Amino acid sequence: MDLQTELGYMRINGWCLLEGIIPADEVEAVRESVEAAVAAHQSTTAPDGIGHVPGLIRFEQSFAPYLAHPRLLGLVEALLGEHVRVSFTTAQINFPGNDRGGWHADWPFNQETAGHVPAPYPDVVMHVTTLWLLSPFNEENGGTYIVPGSHRANNNPSGDNGIDPTQPFPTEMQVTGPAGSVLVFDSRLWHAIAPNRTQRPRTTIAVRYAPWWLNLDVLRPGTVERARLVDETGKRENLQPPLSPQVYETLPAAVKPLFRHAVER
């Protein structure tokens, strides 16, 4: 697909799959590095059967060279404008036997988090989620469930919109594709964790891109916004700790602009 075709898929369906972003002869090494990072830094709050490491790039940079891939960044900038930033890097592994998750949209549209855009939210692309397929995605190993076109709704099942988030949806589908691909979707798109019915983990990284104008401070410890919205209220919110200057300096030159905002001061 060329850029205009990809944009058409994004506008109508809310998602598209870009194959070959990580070369086939390199993706296994990246997967092994990410799995090792999850084993060393697994979040204590992750659901059963799910490997989860927020702020992955603090510990593991094998995927960093691909974050500014021209084809991917071209699509993201066409959606969000120039001067985009990476807001999240999170390792996510579906281990064998994990449960199906609930329907939701990603931050800032998840209505259960402290720093959300209240529903009914406007029909504007504010955030783009990418899932990096480090394992092949198929229906058996937990290819992510999505509801095509749901990004055009002004609420999602995390916001009590009348849809039971625990139940299958009539138009749901599972994303499938080869390792090395990147699933790109509007962060408003309804999606859910799928069960892994195989004997091997299904490994991915969630990398989200934000426009320069979107306030990310509620995600970072020590900020006024996080104190006001999270610490003082007891509400739940994602956490993306800052990068150390030492890690930042190891990033490729083309990737550094995506993280300048996230360096520890």
Image (spheres, rainbow, N blue to C red):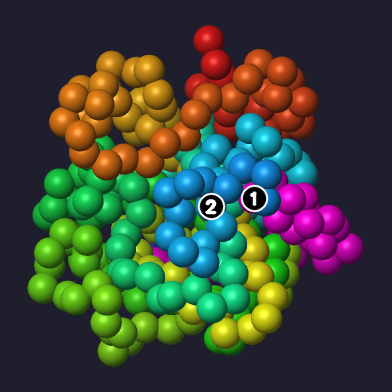
Asked if 4 appears above or below 114 in the picture, the reply is below
The residue lying toward the viewer, choosing from 239 and 181, is 239
Question: Where residue 65 appears, x then y in whole percent?
Answer: 75, 42
Q: Is mark 1 on a helix, strand or loop?
A: helix
Q: Residues within 10 Å of mark 2 (few under 14, many from 20)?
A: many
* Residue depicted at x 68% and y 44%: 40
Question: Where residue 167 appears, x then y in whole percent?
Answer: 27, 82
Whether tag 2 and tag 1 are in contact, CB under 8 A, the answer is yes
Read off the residue under disc 1: 38
What segment carries the magenta color? 14-38
Asked if 141 appears above or below 85 in the picture, the reply is below
Is residue 185 in view?
yes
> Where is residue 102, by image quadrant?
bottom left
Q: Which residue type carries mark 1?
A: Val
The residue lying toward the viewer, choosing from 24 and 228, is 228
> Where is residue 225, by image quadrant?
top left
Is residue 79 in view?
no
Asked if 168 appears above or below 44 in the picture, the reply is below
Asked if 69 appears above or below 254 in the picture, the reply is below
* Residue depicted at x 64% and y 37%: 57
Read off the residue under disc 2: 52
* Residue depicted at x 31% and y 69%: 103
Identify the mark nearer the N-term, 2 or 1: 1
On whether residue 188 falls in the magenta region, the answer is no
* Label drawn at residue 214: none
Image quarter in which the N terminus is found: bottom right
